[in-house]
Image: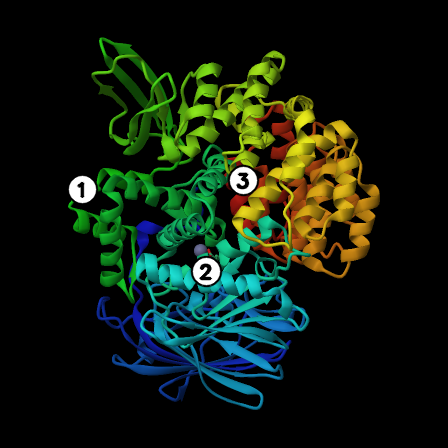
Amino acid sequence: MTDARAIHLADYQPFSHLIEHVALTFHLSPNATRVQARLAVRPNPAREQGLDLRLDGEGLRLVRLAVDGRELTVLPDETGLTIRAADLPDTAFVLETEVEIAPEGNTALEGLYMSRGMYCTQCEAEGFRKITFYPDRPDVMARFRVRVNGDHPVLLSNGNLVDQGPGWTEWDDPWPKPAYLFALVAGDLRAHSATFRTLSGRDVALNIWVRPGDEGRCAYAMDSLIRSMKWDEQVYGREYDLDIFNIVAVDDFNMGAMENKGLNIFNSKFVLASPETATDDDFARIEAIIAHEYFHNWTGNRITCRDWFQLCLKEGLTVYRDQQFTGDMRSHAVKRIEDVLMLRARQFREDQGPLSHAVRPESYVEINNFYTATIYEKGAEVIGMLRRLVGDDGYARALDLYFDRHDGQAATIEDWLCVFQDATGRDLTHFTRWYSEAGTPRLKVSDDFNNDTYTLHFEQENYATPGQPVKWAKVLPISVGMLNPNGDDLLPTTVLEMTHMRQSFAFEGLATRPVASVLRGFSAPVVLERAVSAEERAFLLAHDTDPFNKWEAGRALAKDLLARMVTEGAAIGPGWLEAMARVAQDGSLDPAFRALCLRLPSEDDMAQTLHAAGHVPDPAGIYAGRRRMGDALARRLAPDLPGLIASLAEPGPFTPDARAAGRRALRLAALSLLSRVDGGTAARAAYRAADNMTEEVGALSCLLDIGQGAEELARFEARWRSDRNVMDKWFALQIAYAAPDRAAEVTQTLTQHPDFDWKNPNRFRSVIGALSGHHAGFHHSSGAAYALVAEWLLRLDPLNPQTAARMSTAFDTWPRYDADRQAMVREALQRMLATDGLSRDLTEMAVRMLGD
Ligand code: B3K
Ligand code: ZN
């Protein structure tokens, strides 16, 4: 987009100066915190000499500024201040500043703010400039020493604790870091502690800091942390590098968590867990996010990004690493399926709409708007492809070289690709298109069989995306396998490398026509277009040895059926029902895998697929069709469901491990189907008997799904009223299961609930986000949900632009739908843009979504 305020990758220049050391002193006070900074500065030899010094700073009251002890009068502007070269020595000097800030009034939750009486920080991407004047950019790396003075019993910052006394602590971080990794916490907190001995025998003190009363809910997060630390040593050879590692849980947080050096700050929802309060999904997310933030210590902190255009350098890689970790801890097959579900739901959606952007974008207005599924999830997919192309050994050598060569640096995607080239000798010039070109390639596949030769023909299409009308062929690693018609493996998984727009691969010497299993493991993030008969899909569901494609075959059967139901009024034939029945009853399959197979395609996924196939999706039709499928499946499986449910009962106390969680997932999937035929009898009993949150929420969902559960909802509320994280579920569930024509009304009513604390991002997401996640409810033809979501985004924007902008992506699919819906969404977006004082964040999003 063209915007005067846009920042461009092409304009990058190193900073004028180097900051060798930073000493900060905080005097905490809710409305008048004093921050004294002492920076050891020298001109950057990589730049021309005699440059002014420009420091970022926003909302700071400057009290004092001195260069080498000499006071200077400098007037800050809106975004910072400039010290003229004439006022600076041409060699090293000391810059001192003192500013005053008001954390209590900081509702944006960026910089230093307060959450229920405790102080905390969030500096990525550009929050440090709200704390003190500083070159707030990731390529300026410095050693920090921090003294915190405050009334709270616990005062934390990055690095090692070097000194303390009554009302103060002093911290030293020996590892140079960019300002976005700075953190400070002060509060009345309790620690859940442990010790970790590293590979080389150093002991690290581990603490998870929480509010008094929450200490009993930290064990799982701590266990996840210890396993992450071990795993990074074993798999990547990466050891932790400080004497202490602190994690703090806060209730008001704009996202999941933040990897500040030695002091990770977490949304409390991703730390606190007990069997009574957290579901299996919560446990899994906690494990993954703890790992993700910990892995950033090397991929992000020790090696950081030169500028924010390189964000995927740390995020794509760290997501890739946390996915590997979860696969190792749980199940690679299940993890891959879940990741692809998520990729399609979020990244493909983004990439096929007006917000599509490259994994490495070329410009932005507000960087916080680019913490997207494309940077994170597609960024990770790109690394998975690289690994498929160079092999496991090549990947390991490249990563070793990356850590050796770039430790302590702020690196780029070029640096990253260069280590792969240097370590493996492979030319990756062509591959760079994955970083520079947006959009999801479509891969058309056809085949033929002649004279003992089976040939697969591929054609890739790379559609135009905003600002990128022309695209080139991508390098695609396409994993394929072949099966004999009797179901035996004929060709083990082989990676075909596609580098042109059209390419064919022949397999000779085959006696009969094989059944091909294409794109095993989802080896490239593309939309596969292949006309496959229902029989062949059922065959692959029954016989494919690649678990991803086995699941995918069942998924495709369901989607083909639902598409025909919605567009042609097709009836549900026995094919899909019998295939599902076989999976449900196949005791040789992992219950977690079976639960995934029984899950119907989501409505949004269906709308995406129909739109891509040239239809205008009808949200009400998709909703109704999907319900009919669920009802038909319930009737088909009804006789077996009670037995299946009973066989999956877990004896003994709750454990959060993957095996037990998988059994519960299948049990609850079966209970949900049973509820459709037994009027909720079994689910009501399960609700009463539940001794853990997975089953409590699971049984309640079954009841809400069939329009019941009012009494259970009331009991749930009475029991959990004082637990914020659990109550978020109570809010979200009612909206998620509301009938489409009532979703907006239910949401509206909940916004009047005394516990709808809309300034808390978790609560806002659990209500407004639940409505925008309810496909048929959000896109209801009345437009009521569009209006309600827009109204709340406008209310939130002045207080918390980051969360408002992020949640505005609810509207990014509007071009899929009919003219009436399109007009309503455009009108809502235009109304936002016409609002006085709309944030830069939300403005950029609305402009991009409107696309004109
Ligand atoms: N790096 C942070 C995200 C920061 C988001 C800033 N708007 C968490 C993570 O990716 O691990
Ligand atoms: Zn991250």
Q: Neighbour class for label 1 at 10 Å: few (<14), some, many (≥20)?
A: few
Comparing 660 with 22, the one in front is: 660
Q: Residue 303 in the image: state x and y as whole percent.
A: 32, 62
- The residue singled out by tag 3 in the image is 592
**Furthest residue toward bottom:** 165
- Name the foreground residue: 231 vs 340: 231
Instruction: Say few, some or many: other residues with alpha carbon within 10 Å of mark 3 (under 14 / 14 to 19 / 20 or more).
Output: many
Of callouts 2 and 3, the N-terminal one: 2
Task: For mark 2, give the secondary structure.
Answer: helix
Please tell me which residue lies in front, 159 or 455: 455
Disc 1 target residue: 427
In-image side of 425 versus 142 (left or right)? left
Mark before the other along the chain sequence, 3 or 1: 1
Q: How far apart are labels 3 and 1 at the CA level?
A: 40 Å
Q: Which residue is mark 2?
A: 293
- In x, y percent, where is residue 315? 40, 53
Is 134 drawn above or below residue 463 in the view shown? below
Residue 164: mark: none
Q: Quadrant of residue 93?
A: bottom left
Residue 22 position within the rendered picture, expressed as x and y whole percent measured from the top left: 39, 78
User: Would the CB of label 1 be found within 8 Å of ligand 2?
Assistant: no
Q: Is mark 2 within 8 Å of ligand 1?
A: yes
